[in-house]
Amino acid sequence: MRAVENMSVLVTGGGSGIGAGIAEHLCAAGARVTISGRRADKLAGVAEAIGERCRAVVGDVTVAADRAAMIAGAVDHGGGLDVLVNNAGNMYRGPLDELAEQELLDVFHTNVVGAMMLTQGALPHLVDARGAVVFLGSTHSQRAFPGASPYAATKGAVETLTGVLAAELGPMGVRVSCVRPGAVFTELNQRAGLFDDGEALARLEGLAPAHALGRIGTVAEIAEAVEYLARAEWTTGAVMTVDGGLALGVTNA
Protein backbone atom coordinates (compact mmCIF):
# COMPACT_ATOMS: atom_id res chain seq x y z
CA MET A 1 0.00 0.00 0.00
CA ARG A 2 1.27 3.43 -0.91
CA ALA A 3 1.75 5.82 2.02
CA VAL A 4 -0.69 8.72 2.37
CA GLU A 5 1.87 10.99 4.02
CA ASN A 6 2.57 13.94 1.66
CA MET A 7 0.56 12.35 -1.16
CA SER A 8 -0.66 15.10 -3.50
CA VAL A 9 -4.39 14.78 -4.20
CA LEU A 10 -6.82 16.84 -6.28
CA VAL A 11 -10.47 16.49 -5.23
CA THR A 12 -13.10 18.11 -7.42
CA GLY A 13 -16.39 19.17 -5.89
CA GLY A 14 -14.54 19.69 -2.62
CA GLY A 15 -16.63 22.51 -1.21
CA SER A 16 -19.23 20.29 0.46
CA GLY A 17 -20.52 16.78 1.02
CA ILE A 18 -18.45 13.80 -0.04
CA GLY A 19 -15.69 15.92 -1.59
CA ALA A 20 -15.16 17.91 1.61
CA GLY A 21 -15.21 14.67 3.60
CA ILE A 22 -12.57 13.11 1.35
CA ALA A 23 -10.34 16.17 1.73
CA GLU A 24 -10.70 16.19 5.51
CA HIS A 25 -10.00 12.47 5.78
CA LEU A 26 -6.92 12.48 3.53
CA CYS A 27 -5.43 15.61 5.10
CA ALA A 28 -5.84 14.05 8.55
CA ALA A 29 -3.85 11.08 7.24
CA GLY A 30 -1.04 13.35 6.06
CA ALA A 31 -1.87 14.09 2.41
CA ARG A 32 -1.68 17.50 0.77
CA VAL A 33 -5.07 18.04 -0.83
CA THR A 34 -6.23 20.61 -3.35
CA ILE A 35 -9.99 21.03 -3.52
CA SER A 36 -11.84 22.63 -6.41
CA GLY A 37 -15.37 23.79 -7.06
CA ARG A 38 -17.45 26.67 -8.32
CA ARG A 39 -18.32 28.34 -5.00
CA ALA A 40 -15.43 30.31 -3.53
CA ASP A 41 -17.06 30.76 -0.12
CA LYS A 42 -17.71 27.05 0.36
CA LEU A 43 -14.19 26.09 -0.73
CA ALA A 44 -12.59 28.70 1.52
CA GLY A 45 -14.59 27.46 4.49
CA VAL A 46 -13.52 23.85 3.98
CA ALA A 47 -9.86 24.76 3.41
CA GLU A 48 -9.79 26.99 6.48
CA ALA A 49 -11.40 24.32 8.66
CA ILE A 50 -8.92 21.65 7.54
CA GLY A 51 -5.78 23.78 7.74
CA GLU A 52 -2.58 24.28 5.78
CA ARG A 53 -2.58 20.85 4.17
CA CYS A 54 -5.65 21.86 2.16
CA ARG A 55 -5.68 24.44 -0.64
CA ALA A 56 -8.70 25.69 -2.59
CA VAL A 57 -8.84 26.49 -6.31
CA VAL A 58 -12.08 27.96 -7.64
CA GLY A 59 -13.13 26.50 -10.96
CA ASP A 60 -15.65 24.56 -13.03
CA VAL A 61 -14.69 21.16 -14.47
CA THR A 62 -16.57 22.00 -17.68
CA VAL A 63 -14.21 24.95 -18.42
CA ALA A 64 -10.83 24.11 -19.95
CA ALA A 65 -8.95 27.03 -18.38
CA ASP A 66 -10.38 26.17 -14.96
CA ARG A 67 -9.29 22.54 -15.30
CA ALA A 68 -5.76 23.69 -16.11
CA ALA A 69 -5.77 25.94 -13.03
CA MET A 70 -6.92 23.06 -10.80
CA ILE A 71 -4.09 20.84 -12.00
CA ALA A 72 -1.50 23.61 -11.70
CA GLY A 73 -2.71 24.44 -8.20
CA ALA A 74 -2.48 20.81 -7.10
CA VAL A 75 1.01 20.40 -8.56
CA ASP A 76 2.17 23.58 -6.83
CA HIS A 77 0.61 22.68 -3.49
CA GLY A 78 1.65 19.04 -3.44
CA GLY A 79 4.88 19.07 -5.44
CA GLY A 80 3.30 16.92 -8.15
CA LEU A 81 0.04 15.03 -8.47
CA ASP A 82 -0.41 11.49 -7.16
CA VAL A 83 -4.19 11.08 -7.12
CA LEU A 84 -7.12 12.67 -8.94
CA VAL A 85 -10.53 12.21 -7.32
CA ASN A 86 -13.26 13.02 -9.84
CA ASN A 87 -16.02 13.82 -7.37
CA ALA A 88 -17.65 16.93 -8.88
CA GLY A 89 -21.21 16.15 -9.88
CA ASN A 90 -24.53 17.68 -10.65
CA MET A 91 -28.05 16.32 -10.30
CA TYR A 92 -30.87 16.57 -12.81
CA ARG A 93 -34.00 14.49 -12.55
CA GLY A 94 -37.56 14.28 -13.77
CA PRO A 95 -39.90 12.04 -15.76
CA LEU A 96 -38.79 11.29 -19.31
CA ASP A 97 -41.57 13.31 -20.94
CA GLU A 98 -40.47 16.45 -19.06
CA LEU A 99 -36.70 16.33 -19.60
CA ALA A 100 -34.98 19.21 -21.39
CA GLU A 101 -32.16 18.45 -23.83
CA GLN A 102 -29.87 21.25 -22.66
CA GLU A 103 -30.13 20.22 -19.02
CA LEU A 104 -29.33 16.65 -20.03
CA LEU A 105 -26.26 17.87 -21.88
CA ASP A 106 -25.25 19.99 -18.90
CA VAL A 107 -25.37 17.12 -16.41
CA PHE A 108 -23.35 14.89 -18.76
CA HIS A 109 -20.85 17.71 -19.27
CA THR A 110 -20.21 17.99 -15.53
CA ASN A 111 -20.48 14.37 -14.46
CA VAL A 112 -18.80 12.65 -17.42
CA VAL A 113 -17.11 14.90 -19.99
CA GLY A 114 -15.57 17.31 -17.48
CA ALA A 115 -14.14 14.40 -15.48
CA MET A 116 -12.72 12.80 -18.63
CA MET A 117 -11.06 16.01 -19.78
CA LEU A 118 -9.64 16.74 -16.33
CA THR A 119 -8.17 13.24 -16.27
CA GLN A 120 -6.66 13.88 -19.68
CA GLY A 121 -5.04 17.09 -18.46
CA ALA A 122 -3.73 15.47 -15.29
CA LEU A 123 -2.38 12.40 -17.05
CA PRO A 124 1.28 13.49 -17.53
CA HIS A 125 1.57 14.18 -13.80
CA LEU A 126 -0.16 10.93 -12.88
CA VAL A 127 2.18 8.99 -15.17
CA ASP A 128 5.19 10.61 -13.51
CA ALA A 129 3.84 9.66 -10.09
CA ARG A 130 2.55 6.22 -11.12
CA GLY A 131 -0.59 7.52 -9.53
CA ALA A 132 -4.30 6.86 -9.44
CA VAL A 133 -7.65 8.19 -10.59
CA VAL A 134 -10.74 7.61 -8.47
CA PHE A 135 -14.17 8.31 -9.91
CA LEU A 136 -17.39 8.56 -7.91
CA GLY A 137 -20.22 6.42 -9.22
CA SER A 138 -23.60 5.76 -7.63
CA THR A 139 -25.97 2.99 -6.64
CA HIS A 140 -28.32 4.64 -9.16
CA SER A 141 -26.49 2.48 -11.71
CA GLN A 142 -27.63 -0.66 -9.86
CA ARG A 143 -31.15 0.15 -8.67
CA ALA A 144 -33.88 1.84 -10.68
CA PHE A 145 -35.27 5.02 -9.12
CA PRO A 146 -38.02 6.45 -11.37
CA GLY A 147 -37.29 10.02 -12.39
CA ALA A 148 -33.54 9.67 -11.88
CA SER A 149 -32.65 8.57 -15.42
CA PRO A 150 -30.35 11.53 -16.26
CA TYR A 151 -28.21 11.13 -13.15
CA ALA A 152 -28.24 7.32 -13.37
CA ALA A 153 -27.13 7.46 -17.00
CA THR A 154 -24.14 9.67 -16.14
CA LYS A 155 -23.05 7.39 -13.31
CA GLY A 156 -23.42 4.30 -15.48
CA ALA A 157 -21.16 6.03 -18.00
CA VAL A 158 -18.58 6.84 -15.30
CA GLU A 159 -18.51 3.25 -14.07
CA THR A 160 -18.02 1.91 -17.60
CA LEU A 161 -15.34 4.53 -18.22
CA THR A 162 -13.50 3.29 -15.15
CA GLY A 163 -12.83 -0.11 -16.71
CA VAL A 164 -11.88 1.24 -20.11
CA LEU A 165 -9.42 3.78 -18.69
CA ALA A 166 -7.98 1.20 -16.29
CA ALA A 167 -7.11 -0.97 -19.31
CA GLU A 168 -5.82 2.00 -21.32
CA LEU A 169 -3.73 3.66 -18.62
CA GLY A 170 -2.50 0.57 -16.80
CA PRO A 171 0.51 0.13 -19.09
CA MET A 172 1.48 3.69 -18.16
CA GLY A 173 1.43 2.79 -14.47
CA VAL A 174 -1.76 4.71 -13.70
CA ARG A 175 -4.53 2.96 -11.74
CA VAL A 176 -8.21 3.85 -12.32
CA SER A 177 -11.01 2.81 -10.00
CA CYS A 178 -14.40 3.99 -8.78
CA VAL A 179 -16.34 4.20 -5.52
CA ARG A 180 -20.07 3.51 -5.83
CA PRO A 181 -21.79 5.15 -2.84
CA GLY A 182 -25.28 4.42 -1.63
CA ALA A 183 -27.54 6.88 0.17
CA VAL A 184 -25.46 9.58 1.84
CA PHE A 185 -26.78 12.95 3.00
CA THR A 186 -25.17 15.72 0.91
CA GLU A 187 -26.16 18.95 -0.82
CA LEU A 188 -26.66 16.99 -4.05
CA ASN A 189 -30.02 15.88 -2.71
CA GLN A 190 -31.35 19.43 -2.87
CA ARG A 191 -30.43 19.53 -6.54
CA ALA A 192 -32.83 16.62 -7.00
CA GLY A 193 -35.69 19.00 -6.28
CA LEU A 194 -35.63 18.69 -2.49
CA PHE A 195 -35.66 22.21 -1.21
CA ASP A 196 -34.31 22.04 2.33
CA ASP A 197 -32.04 19.91 4.48
CA GLY A 198 -34.88 18.52 6.55
CA GLU A 199 -36.84 17.26 3.58
CA ALA A 200 -33.75 15.80 1.94
CA LEU A 201 -32.63 14.02 5.11
CA ALA A 202 -36.12 12.64 5.76
CA ARG A 203 -36.29 11.25 2.22
CA LEU A 204 -32.90 9.56 2.55
CA GLU A 205 -33.65 8.15 5.99
CA GLY A 206 -36.83 6.72 4.50
CA LEU A 207 -34.50 4.55 2.40
CA ALA A 208 -32.79 3.11 5.48
CA PRO A 209 -34.88 -0.12 5.51
CA ALA A 210 -33.80 -0.78 1.90
CA HIS A 211 -30.19 -1.09 3.11
CA ALA A 212 -29.11 -4.50 4.40
CA LEU A 213 -27.38 -2.69 7.29
CA GLY A 214 -30.50 -0.67 8.07
CA ARG A 215 -29.11 2.85 7.76
CA ILE A 216 -27.84 5.42 5.31
CA GLY A 217 -24.11 6.08 5.03
CA THR A 218 -21.77 8.90 5.98
CA VAL A 219 -19.26 10.89 3.97
CA ALA A 220 -16.49 9.53 6.20
CA GLU A 221 -17.31 5.97 5.09
CA ILE A 222 -17.01 6.98 1.43
CA ALA A 223 -13.73 8.76 2.15
CA GLU A 224 -12.30 5.56 3.63
CA ALA A 225 -12.98 3.73 0.38
CA VAL A 226 -11.39 6.52 -1.67
CA GLU A 227 -8.28 6.33 0.51
CA TYR A 228 -8.01 2.58 -0.07
CA LEU A 229 -8.21 2.95 -3.86
CA ALA A 230 -5.69 5.81 -3.78
CA ARG A 231 -3.22 3.61 -1.90
CA ALA A 232 -3.80 0.08 -3.25
CA GLU A 233 -1.04 -0.49 -5.79
CA TRP A 234 -2.42 -3.69 -7.36
CA THR A 235 -6.04 -2.58 -7.64
CA THR A 236 -7.32 -1.07 -10.88
CA GLY A 237 -10.56 -1.23 -12.81
CA ALA A 238 -12.45 -1.82 -9.56
CA VAL A 239 -15.89 -0.40 -8.86
CA MET A 240 -16.15 -0.58 -5.08
CA THR A 241 -19.72 -0.57 -3.82
CA VAL A 242 -19.99 1.21 -0.46
CA ASP A 243 -23.72 1.34 0.11
CA GLY A 244 -24.71 -0.57 3.23
CA GLY A 245 -26.29 -3.20 1.02
CA LEU A 246 -28.66 -0.88 -0.87
CA ALA A 247 -27.83 -2.44 -4.25
CA LEU A 248 -28.78 -5.89 -2.95
CA GLY A 249 -32.43 -5.02 -3.47
CA VAL A 250 -33.53 -5.83 0.09
CA THR A 251 -37.31 -5.86 0.38
CA ASN A 252 -39.82 -6.67 3.07
CA ALA A 253 -42.28 -8.08 0.52
Image: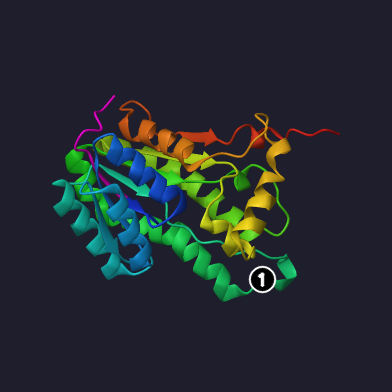
Residue at horizontal 60 percent and vertical 53 percent from the top = 152
Q: Is residue 16 left or right of residue 83?
A: right
Q: Is residue 40 above or below residue 199?
A: below
Can residue 152 be seen in this snapshot?
yes
Q: Is residue 170 left or right of residue 32?
A: right
Image quarter of the N terminus: top left
Verify whether residue 189 appears in magenta.
no
Q: Is residue 13 left or right of residue 160?
A: left
Q: Amino acid at mark 1?
A: Leu
**Which element is circle 1 on?**
loop
Between residues 69 and 199, which one lies in front from this camera angle? Answer: 199
Highlighted range, magenta: 1-10
Between residues 236 and 251, which one lies in front from this camera angle? Answer: 251
The spot of residue 108 in percent (x, y) is 50, 63
Image quarter of the C terminus: top right
Q: Is residue 101 above or below residue 94?
A: below
Residue at horizontal 72 percent and vertical 45 percent from the top = 206
Q: Main secondary structure of the magenta part?
A: loop
Can residue 237 be seen in this snapshot?
no
Instruction: Report the coloring of the rendering.
Output: rainbow
**Residue to which mark 1 is pinned:** 99
Q: Is residue 155 above or below residue 240?
A: below
Q: Is residue 25 left or right of residue 51?
A: right
Residue extending farthest to the right is: 253
